[in-house]
DNA sequence: CAATTGATGTAATAACATAACATATTGAAT
DNA sequence: ATTCAATATGTTATGTTATTACATCAATTG
């Protein structure tokens, strides 16, 4: 999918995520956008919904947060499954794509006649700096 | 880890999960246990915390729910990473263990000098029956 | 210009999770 | 058996995350 022109709210939310050091919760985004006229969670959630659809933002299910995709200009949907390593201390997130992992997971679900829609791989732990 | 004798509340919560067709939210469990004296969410969350620790229950991060481990009598912690296929229509959950997937994910994080603590792999989609 | 579509604004509420504090139970050491 | 510590439990309140419902606005198009 090619990313269409972002609307005002979508741009505001995306900019906040891009400038952030790590993932942010929807309510943290809301707070950062109060000066720009945001008043309600839905303004954030609606923008996020589109940004997720366009593949420029990821949702981290295990920490209820959102992060800008690490591949600027790229369409993340074309990379297959994305795995995330999330530092529980500093919040830093690393992205990873591995075709063999994709392949094995998809081979398994195919064997089960299961139709996959969305796959989440999230590894929580400590990054190099925080583990030291 | 060997599973110790469960306490009263832990047993009640575990029994509810075992008898359930699929994953349940903490509040659904609470409702099912009101007749047994449960009044507050914390009673459920505290029992779940222990059951997760013992490896007899899994938390499904992407749907904020909990499910009894599919390997009765077994200690799930010894199987390495568990992958789940979750049917978004009927709620049915399948468990899967694959050493190659583990290995590749762990090789990657090791290369990043990242210290993994807990890994989540969840595939949402439609099971065979629901996809038909 | 009406009609449709997509975006936005606002209030209320639902759903998920934890903090703080009190009490009770259990089990080991004396 | 009694004391002590550790664990489990009960209760209230609150914090956090997400959605429903409804109204309005703006751009596009027939």
Image (tube, coloured by chain):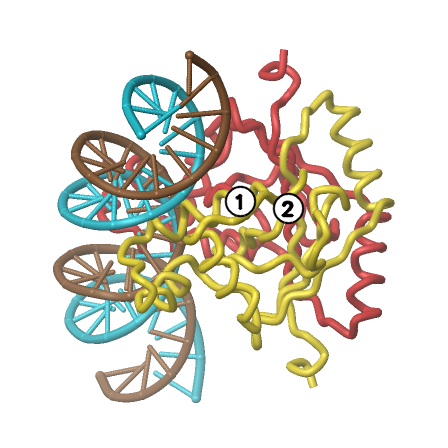
Chain colours: A red, B yellow, C brown, D cyan
- Tell me the number on the disc at residue B120: 2
Front-most of residues B48 and A87: B48
Q: Residue at x 67, y 36 (%)?
A: A95
Crowd class of label 2 (few under 14; some 14 to 19; many from 20; radius 10 Å): many
Judge whether B36 appears above or below B117 on screen: below
Judge whether A88 appears above or below A80 on screen: above
Crowd class of label 1 (few under 14; some 14 to 19; many from 20; radius 10 Å): many
Chain under disc 1 = A
**In this image, B57 relative to A9: left or right?**
right
Q: How many marks?
A: 2
Q: Residue at x 64, y 46 (%)?
A: B120
* Quadrant position of the N terminus of chain A in the picture: bottom right
Toward which corner of the image does residue B27 lie, by quadrant?
bottom left
Asked whether disc 2 touches disc 1, contact meaning CB atoms under 8 Å apart, the reply is yes
**In this image, B26 relative to B62: left or right?**
left
Residue A12 visible at all: no
Label 2 in the same subunit as label 1: no
Q: Residue at x 75, y 42 (%)?
A: B78
Judge whether A95 appears above or below A101 on screen: above
Residue on which the image places disc 1:
A62
Considering the numbered disc 1 on the image, is that residue within a helix, a strand or a loop? helix
Considering the numbered disc 2 on the image, is that residue within a helix, a strand or a loop? strand
Whole-number angstrom distance, CA of label 2 to CA of label 1 = 8 Å
Front-most of residues A70 and D5: D5
Q: Residue at x 48, y 64 (%)?
A: B24
């Amino acid at each position: 999918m090619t990313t269409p022109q972002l609307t005002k709210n979508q741009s505001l939310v995306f900019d906040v995520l891009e400038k952030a050091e790590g993932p942010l919760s929807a309510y943290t985004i809301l707070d950062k956008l109060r000066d720009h006229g945001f008043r309600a969670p839905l303004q954030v959630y609606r923008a996020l919904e589109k940004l997720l659809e366009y593949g420029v933002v990821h949702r981290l299910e295990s920490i209820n947060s959102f992060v800008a995709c690490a591949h600027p200009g790229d369409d993340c949907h074309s990379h297959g499954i994305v795995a995330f390593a999330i530092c529980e201390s500093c919040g830093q997130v690393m992205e990873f794509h591995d075709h063999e992992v994709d392949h094995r997971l998809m081979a398994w679900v195919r064997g089960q006649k299961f139709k996959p829609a969305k796959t989440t791989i999230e590894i929580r732990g400590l990054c190099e700096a925080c583990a030291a």
